[in-house]
Amino acid sequence: MKRQKKVLVVVATAVMVAFALAVPVSAQIHAFEAKLKAQRGGGLSAQVQSLTPVDVQQTFLDCVECIFLDTYDPLNTPPGDLIAHTATVLKGGTPYLITIQGTYSVWPLYIWVGLGQGAPEPAPQFPSPGGENGLVVSDWEYLFAHYSPVPPLVFPIRLPFESVSLDGGLTYQVLIPLGGPVYNGTDHVYQYLVEGQGNQAFFRKHDAPTNDNYGQFKICVQVVTSICTNNDCNNGGASGN
């Protein structure tokens, strides 16, 4: 069932740049920006760009679907692509907010040398139900620990192994989170604003082998029904009237 709720999303002055970077094709970026501006009577861009990092944008969302991507695959299905997809089709031309949370490890417990290096966490946020779970080293976007103290590394390290497909799994893109490529070590939540293309959304993590991984990612897709700033919402709701 769909339910409407208000979600508070902190945005900085450059949030419109993040909106654009989250959409892979330039033609779609411009069309999507125009639609978002039209929602606010053409004034969204100026309003959002005037916000400071402590300002809050209030976004009205309808929950579409939440799924899990398990990084543990005992079959080692080649070529090591771990994929999950929505059952729901994302309507073409419609804005959606994707929220991804979770931690995992690509290394089995038995090869750890003490606590390795970095800041490993004791367990996945969402454990793999079929595998052995333990220390985790990464979230969707960043590596924050390593199983061995050598060679010395500087954390966090942005990963190239995650991608999203909006065309039904035909092509995949690495998306830029809202707010830019910034490590979130607090709750490991990353959000992406995208435009539906009339297909299911596919999510992919790559690793080989996959039978020594553990940890799941919770992925929620929400349709953006309207956007307003705090002052606008307080003065008249999502429409600003």
Image (cartoon, rainbow, N blue to C red):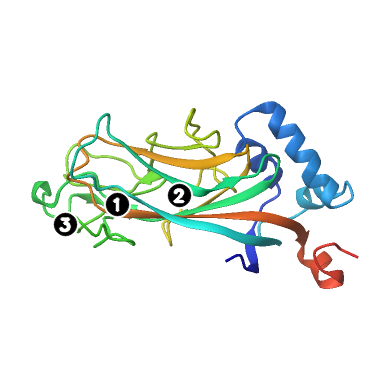
Q: Is any part of residue 45 visible from this angle? A: no
Is 120 on the left or on the right of 52, as rendered?
left
Residue under the point 38% across and 38% down: 159
- Give the mark toward the camera: 1 or 3: 3
Q: Circle 1 sits in a helix, a strand or a loop, which is it? A: strand
Check the image and report above or below for 236 versus 160: below
Question: In the rendered image, which quarter contains the C terminus?
Answer: bottom right
Residue located at (50% from left, 32% from top): 173
Callout 3 amino acid: Glu
| Residue denoted by label 2 | 183
Circle 1: is it few (<14), some (14-19), or many (20+) Cα within 10 Å? many
- Residue positioned 52% across, 57% down in the render: 65
Counting residues from the start of the chain, the first of labels 1 and 3 encountered is 1
Quadrant in the rendering for residue 167: top right
**Marks 2, 1: nearer the viewer:** 1
Residue 1: x and y, percent? 57, 66
Q: Amino acid at mark 2?
A: Tyr
Residue highlighted by disc 1: 104
Q: Secondary structure at mark 3?
A: loop
Give the vertical position of 80 relative to 234 (above or below): above
- Rendering coords of residue 39 (x, y %): 83, 51
Marks 1 and 3: CB-CB under 8 Å?
no
Q: Residues within 10 Å of mark 2 (few under 14, many from 20)?
A: many
